[in-house]
Amino acid sequence: MFRDPAAERAYAIVGDPAAGRADAIVCDPSAARRRRQSGTSLIELVIAIVVVAISLTGTLLVVDTTTRRSAEPMLERQAISLAAAYLDEALSKAYLDPQSGSVCPAPETRRDLLDNVCDFDGLDERGARDPNGNAIAGLEGYRIQLAVDRAAQLGGLSGSSEVLRVDVTVTDGLGRPVRLSGYRTNP
């Protein structure tokens, strides 16, 4: 028997076929079409996968950027805190060398022997250290540099006999420097 799918019709029996009673046979051409169109095609699935992939890529990029940037303020605050601690330590030392009584003699060679402001000139440490020279855990990624300006000017004061400027530069693990400066006057 030859079948023409385009001419196929779906028929529904109206009545109670179980009781052997059929009131009418109804021809419904859309029923066959609905039966053939159920589900999704391969093209629709591919398009849906591409749309979902693009959406996820955008979302993950935003999450990645946010996560990276959330650490930057913490690193900057730590760098500022380190710079302030080193600056406070340098400025709390004597203006004149306790052994010689002079301004800016030759600097000490060990961290625990720094006893005057000028001893901090040229200090360059990888990783933060306490005043005794012991490394501070968790702060190894910072570089701390100090410089003492002997030709500083502050108001009417100038020169190493009256005023010194201490510059502390702390560079975080991302290579961003933070610089704090302070002045120490001769009492």
Image: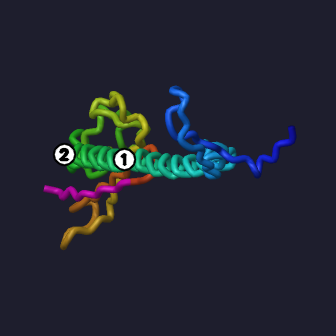
Residue 162 as seen in the image, left or right of residue 61? left
* Residue at (43, 53) in percent of width and height: 176
Going 32% across and 45% down the picture, which residue do you hit?
74
Where, by quadrant of the figure, is residue 131 drawn? top left
Of callouts 2 and 1, the N-terminal one: 1
Q: Is residue 186 visible?
A: yes
Provide residue 164's location: percent of width, then percent of height: 26, 58
Placement of 73 over or under 151, stated as above or below:
above
Q: Amino acid at mark 1?
A: Ser
- On the image, the x and y values in percent for residue 91 come to 22, 49
Mostly what secondary structure, the magenta segment? strand
List x then y, in percent, for residue 98. Answer: 21, 41
Using the image as rendered, state which of residue 46 and residue 93 is in the foreground.
46
Identity of the residue furthest to the left in this view: 187
Residue closest to the far right: 2
- Badge 1 crowding class, 10 Å Cα cut-off, few under 14, some 14 to 19, many 20 or more, is few
* Res 92 label: 2
Label 2 to label 1: alpha-carbon separation: 34 Å
Q: Nearer the viewer, residue 100 or 186?
A: 186
Q: Quadrant of residue 49?
A: top right
Is 181 contained in the magenta span?
yes
Q: Which residues are magenta?
A: 178-187
Identified by mark 2, the residue type is Ser
The residue located at (32%, 64%) in the rendering is 151
From the viewer's perspective, is 1 left or right of 133?
right
Name the residue carrying label 1.
Answer: 70
Above or below, 14 against 183 in this view is: above
